């Protein structure tokens, strides 16, 4: 199975820690975030890893992985960055944001999932936001599900009252769903990358969640892998300082 790590962003809110390196190479618990991910993939038997690089791409050290470029990282966002994987975005894939760390067991559970799509969703998300003043709840990608457990909506426009939990930026997409996402993306491109897309002002500024919502609205089934904590996003200096105080779920 293949994993694709989206790691092209500039990490401006982590400066000065990202002044000389890409965000995914900032160290947490003694090693770069990306290396925690690579070890989790290896433990679960995911031996084909693609890293989407952009900002300071040459600083990405990813033993055994392929690094491909998002040359327009300064003007696009997560969605367009993912599709820079090109021919590597095919078949069953695990997709991960580059600025998160998580318990390795989560990857094993994703590999074993048989749903058309599986999003990792933290049920204990509120606890992380206590005192997280530099990244408030309004910026959380929350997830709403149906009574039968299917994802109905995900992203920053899902309010806390309707949220099952927080989408952590990690999930598994099976081959048919990947093909559907390609179709939706190429259709959007034909309309122009400066046209609105989902909740984003333009396709260029769209998030992964925008295309997942588009797919869900067209009947694509995505389930959730519910966790209780066991992960952390490192988006700001405050996040980094809190993570460096201790993350018990990392080996």
Image: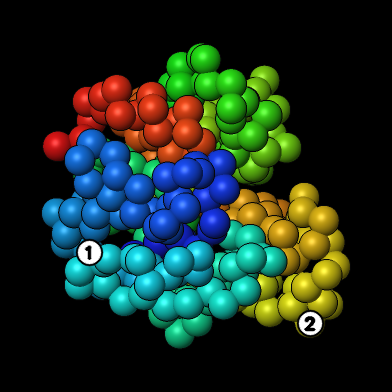
Viewer-proximal residue, 124 or 92?
A: 124
Left or right side of 136 for 122: left
Which residue shows up at 62% across the image and 74% down it? Answer: 72
Please, what secondary structure does the residue beneath circle 2 have? helix
Could you tell which of marks 2 and 1 lies nearer the N-terminus?
1
Q: Residue at horizontal 23%, vertical 30%? A: 249
User: Which residue is disc 2 drawn over?
Assistant: 190
Side of 244 relative to 122 (left or right): left
On-image quarter of the N terminus: bottom left
Q: Is residue 148 visible?
A: no
Q: Quadrant of residue 220?
A: bottom right
Please determine whether, in this image, residue 224 is positioned above or below residue 55. above
Q: Please tell me which residue is depicted at 56% across the width and 41% down the height of the picture.
A: 13
* Most foreground residue, 7 or 211: 7
Q: Tell me where residue 33 appears, x and y as whole percent.
A: 31, 48
| Figure disc tally | 2
Residue assigned mark 1: 46
| Residue for point 77% across, 50% down | 199
Q: Nearer the viewer, residue 25 or 109?
A: 25
Q: Label 2 to label 1, Cα distance in Å?
A: 34 Å
Residue 172 placed where, x, y %?
A: 40, 57
User: In the image, is residue 216 above or below residue 74?
Assistant: above
Residue 179 at x, y percent in the picture: 54, 75
Location of residue 216 in the rendering, given as x and y in whole percent from the top left corner: 64, 54
């Amino acid at each position: 199975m293949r994993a694709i790590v989206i790691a092209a962003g500039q990490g401006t809110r982590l400066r000065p820690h990202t002044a000389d390196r890409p965000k995914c190479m900032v160290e947490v618990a003694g090693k770069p975030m990306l290396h925690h991910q690579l070890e989790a993939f290896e433990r679960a038997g995911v031996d084909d890893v693609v890293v989407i690089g952009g900002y300071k791409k040459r600083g990405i050290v990813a033993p055994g992985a392929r690094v491909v470029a998002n040359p327009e990282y300064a003007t696009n966002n997560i969605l367009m960055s993912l599709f820079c994987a090109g021919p590597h975005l095919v078949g069953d894939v695990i997709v991960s944001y580059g600025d998160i760390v998580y318990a390795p067991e989560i990857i094993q559970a994703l590999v074993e999932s048989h749903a058309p799509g599986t999003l990792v969703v933290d049920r204990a998300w509120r606890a992380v936001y206590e005192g997280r003043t530099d990244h408030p709840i309004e910026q959380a990608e929350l997830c709403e599900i149906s009574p039968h457990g299917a994802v109905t909506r995900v992203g920053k426009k899902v309010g806390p009252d309707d949220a099952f939990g927080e989408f952590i930026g990690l999930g598994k997409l099976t081959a048919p769903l990947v093909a559907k996402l390609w179709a939706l993306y190429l259709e959007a491109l034909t309309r122009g990358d400066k046209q609105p897309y989902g909740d984003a002002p333009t396709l260029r500024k769209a998030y992964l969640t925008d295309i997942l919502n588009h797919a869900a609205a067209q009947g694509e089934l995505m389930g959730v892998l519910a966790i209780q904590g066991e992960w952390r996003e490192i988006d700001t200096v405050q996040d980094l300082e809190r993570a460096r105080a201790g993350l018990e779920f990392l080996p």
